Amino acid sequence: MRQAVRSLDQLLAQLGLSAASVGVSEAAARQFPVLVTPEWMAAMERGNPQDPLLRQVLPDAREEQPVPGFTSDPLQEVGTQATAGIVRKYRGRALLIATGACAVHCRYCFRRHFPYQEAGMTASRWNTAFAELRADPTLREVIFSGGDPLVLGNRPLGRMVSDLSGLPQLRWLRFHTRLPLVLPERVDAGLCEMLSATGLPTALVIHCNHPHELTPGARAALRRLRDCGVTLLNQSVLLRGINDEPDVLIRLSESLYAAGVLPYYLHLLDPVAGAAHFLVEDASAQVLHASIKARLPGYLVPRLVREIPGEDAKSWVR
């Protein structure tokens, strides 16, 4: 992480691009800072302003344009925090905002405006949060999210996992993370040992939008996770100009399966302020999904979904 790219000038310089050639915005970069790991930088095509990995992290001038319906809290999560750091949206499940930190800043992130300073899981907040979870007899699954939970070191993460593993009502654990893709070195022996020792079935959901993200380092990290008994799933976001073509989505599903990961969800874009230029309209998304469904076996076709605040589950788009 000390070697990560953290400025717009540095990002463009390493790729041999000019600001004028890519339509960037210094103001957008100040509002939501650039952060890209060396693994991802190495996977980008130098000199290509349309590179699909670059476009996910590049501050775009269009982010500054207000668009009706695109808000700072599109999923209305701020009001669902019963305790700082716990988001309760679905019955039997609790989502932990384990940390506000990520290893890469995706421009379409639905939590790019989230008040992490009020919800990050410090040691004292964890004591309060764990007391609430322990007292909930309906709890079946805890989902580690963020930010990115694997940004935490093995010691603080291990404490939370160990505490949760002792809850008799808990049946599963789940982690949502990009680190196996953008910082594969994070999947170290200590992490694998911790995940193997939980005693609970554990799923790890990666977030991969394009087959170029599955670098050799990422594939090796995913293999290490499989070897320690973790179920690997993927969720993508459908993004205009990045993966809104049938051939790209088909290659993504096939590449994921070759890496031991099952496609899980293909999300329609959450309407977060600053991300409207990524939007793929429903009708186009349905045509794309029908196309990949006709060309792939059913187990490689992710469900096309959107999240609607207040609903009991993700809503399928048919």
Image: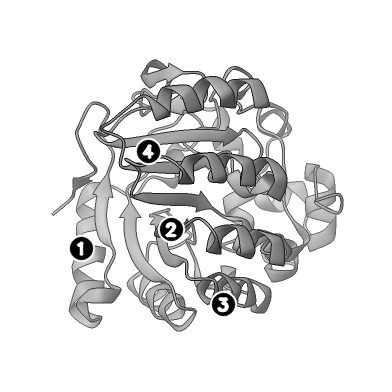
Closer to the chain start, of discs 1 and 4, is: 4
Q: Amino acid at mark 2?
A: Thr
Name which residue lies at 83% across and 60% down: 14
Element under label 4? loop
Name which residue lies at 29% across and 75% down: 300
**From this viewpoint, is residue 1 visible?**
yes
The residue carrying mark 4 is 270
Does residue 187 appear left or right of residue 109 in this picture? Answer: right
The residue carrying mark 1 is 287
Q: Amino acid at mark 4?
A: Asp
112, above or below 142, in the image? above
Name which residue lies at 25% across and 50% down: 305
Element under label 3? helix
Q: Quadrant of residue 216?
A: bottom right
The crowding category of the residue bearing disc 4, from other C-alpha atoms within 10 Å (few below 14, some 14 to 19, many at least 20), is many
Q: Amino acid at mark 3?
A: Arg
Closer to the chain start, of discs 2 and 1, is: 2
Marks 2 and 3 sit apart, C-alpha to C-alpha, by 15 Å
Q: Amino acid at mark 1?
A: Val
| Colouring scheme applied when the structure was drawn | one colour
The residue carrying mark 2 is 202
